Image (cartoon, rainbow, N blue to C red):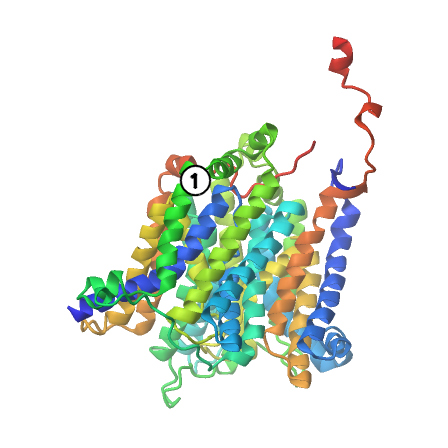
Amino acid sequence: MLKLERRKEPSKFMLYVTPFVAVVLTMLAGLLLFLLLGKAPVQAITLIYFTPLTSIFSLTELAVKATPLILIAIGLSFGFRAGIWNIGAEGQFIMGAVCGGAVALALYEVQGIWVLPLMCVAGIIGGMLWAAIPAYLRIRFNANEILVSLMLVYVATLLLSILVHGVLRDPDGHNFPESRLFHDSATLPILIENTRAHLGIIVTLVVVVIAWVFVQRHIIGFQIKALGDAPRAAKFAGFSENRIIWLCFLTSGALAGLAGLFEAAGPVGQLVPALPVGYGFTAIIVAFLGRLNPIGIFLGGLLMALTYIGGEGAQIAMSLPSATTSVFQGMLLFFLLATDILINFRFRWISKKPDSLEPAPVSLQQAE
Amino acid sequence: MDLFVNILLGISIAATPLVFAAIGELVVEKSGVLNLGVEGMMIIGAISGFAVTIETGSFILGILASIVAGALMAFLFGVLTQSLLANQVATGLALTMFGLGLAALIGQDYSGKSTGDFPKLDIPFISDLPIVGPLIFGQDYLLYLSIILVVAVIWFFNKTRAGLIIRAIGENHDAAHTIGYPVVLYRYYALLFGGACAGLGGAYLSLVQTPIWVENMTAGRGWIALALVVFAAWRPGRALLGAYLFGGITILQLHSQGFGINIEPQILAMLPYLATIVVLVLISRDKTKVRLNAPASLAKSFYAST
């Protein structure tokens, strides 16, 4: 019979191979799904996974989509390593966009190279403050951070709606619930002409490198890992759990806030109720896909962006429903979690032997 | 008086999906498993129940479909977390994301359709009595089922052998395993029950509360149900009470205009979510108490080395 057997130590090989296995399994399951939906399966998979890679424009779009995913996922990965679950990044993303966007609108028609950095600071602070709520309630009142951070996503969405219906609404916009378009000083510079590739992409690359150095080389990176792997040992070693909770939440809030500001000041260019499209949730998958490692997250973010771009292409070309993308993303996370078992365990085929052939335990032999 | 009856009716209708989802999750957590995928199971239950009712014209088949669909989702969770020992938090999130996507995918062809009114209890004369008639003898059948379910779960945990075994497994799965109880099997049973209940809660939304299909119509109720279990300190009776309290908060936003309160609708819509946070803070404040009430093996993977 097939039996699970714990490995003596986690398999490095499986750690890096299983994400690829999960992607392949998702494609296979996708084929099946499209077959059930009565759509040409091979064509759909080609459109989703390969067509976006064939044109320069869609490659830049890939980078634009990957930017918020990677930024948010890097922030989340610290907490996930430590067993601290901030799943409200979507709310922090919105608050970053709201705070940074409010600065842009307050400084409407003010030109200056300092406007954009100021917006970024406001966005980061907005995200951090929103993330500070679950962190504080967890530390002070022991309230579950998963539920609190998630509830705050709904609150942030409604808050954005109130603001663009109210104080931040475009005064010349015929009562549409949207803000003015940000002016030039308040929008991210474009890197390549006639595309949407913006400065945020460069910032994201820098963040990836900084995060990598931090995780590998800094003592706090080690403390975070220790708290997740061996909480008791971490406490005996004198690592402050509260300090790490604060650190993880504020970092992920800051990065999610920055991502939100980039989205508002980049591809969208204003505040609209439809600004949040679930990047904060997809980033959770990206963090796991990248094995909570900054370089892995970078690759995972690109792959996830590919399914977004390809998914959109397939929706238009084959009139697929827009929910296809989220089904794919959910399946990917399932397969990833399912194949995770291969890291710590292996499957062994054990033929059933009669018990008598096994040597009796030492204590029994002595008794005889 | 009519307004009073209407408010109470509204509360019970808003509360019932939460009762179903929370009582299911409570049983799951009592067995030591944390399934954060309630939202995903609910929405799948909502669309399956709705689609089957539209296709067959039968509410009973629709409800059965929602039960089966919710349980299937829970089975998926069980395979991952119980057989493949995946992280329960991450798997629960995956279940929610997958469920929301799949429901939207299936629901595409069903938006704008309606199943019509769900049948209500109608006893001649008694259901026509003032106040108690509509409130106690004139509700829809699923609402009575939700109350019966809560009573049954109380009885199950206190009076049956299987209930005691599940509680033992939730407190200490290693000890339960040593005594010889099949930990993983019982956890599968609990999960399937939880999934079926969440599916029913979803069906209540799409068949009774608003008999139309809207994408993301659960709107966080699965998460609120999870908070209710904490609020209830893992006691079924208190979960029922909590669900009705939340039903009250939800109804407040519908009737506030009637009372002449003029607040932006979005602020009222925030109330259930803010209330959840407040409740979590109030309940969790006392760390020792939570630790005493929560099943000790909650969210821990079980692997029998022998």
Q: Residue furthest left?
A: B1
Q: Which residue is drawn at 65% across and 63% down?
A: A331
Q: Image height check: is A326 above or below A252?
A: below
Q: Position of residue B28 (x, y in %)?
A: 50, 47
Decide: few, some or many residues near mark 1? Use Cα within 10 Å; few <14, some 14-19, many ≥20: some
Q: In this view, does B286 lie to the left or right of A319?
A: left
Q: In this view, does B289 lie to the left or right of A85?
A: left
Q: Where is residue A363 in the image (x, y as percent from the top left)?
A: 74, 14
Any part of residue B270 in sight: yes
Q: Which residue is drawn at 83% across and 32% down?
A: A353
Residue holding disc 1: B157
In the rendered image, the quadrant that contains the C terminus of chain A is top right
Q: Is mark 1 on a helix, strand or loop?
A: helix
Q: Which residue is drawn at 61% across and 43% down?
A: A225
Q: Residue at x 36, y 74 (%)?
A: A162
Q: Image height check: is A82 above or below B70?
A: above
Q: Where is residue A273 in the image (x, y as percent from the top left)?
A: 44, 76
Residue nearer the viewer, B109 or B55: B55
Residue nearer the viewer, B283 or A179: B283
Q: In this view, does B255 lie to the left or right of A71?
A: left
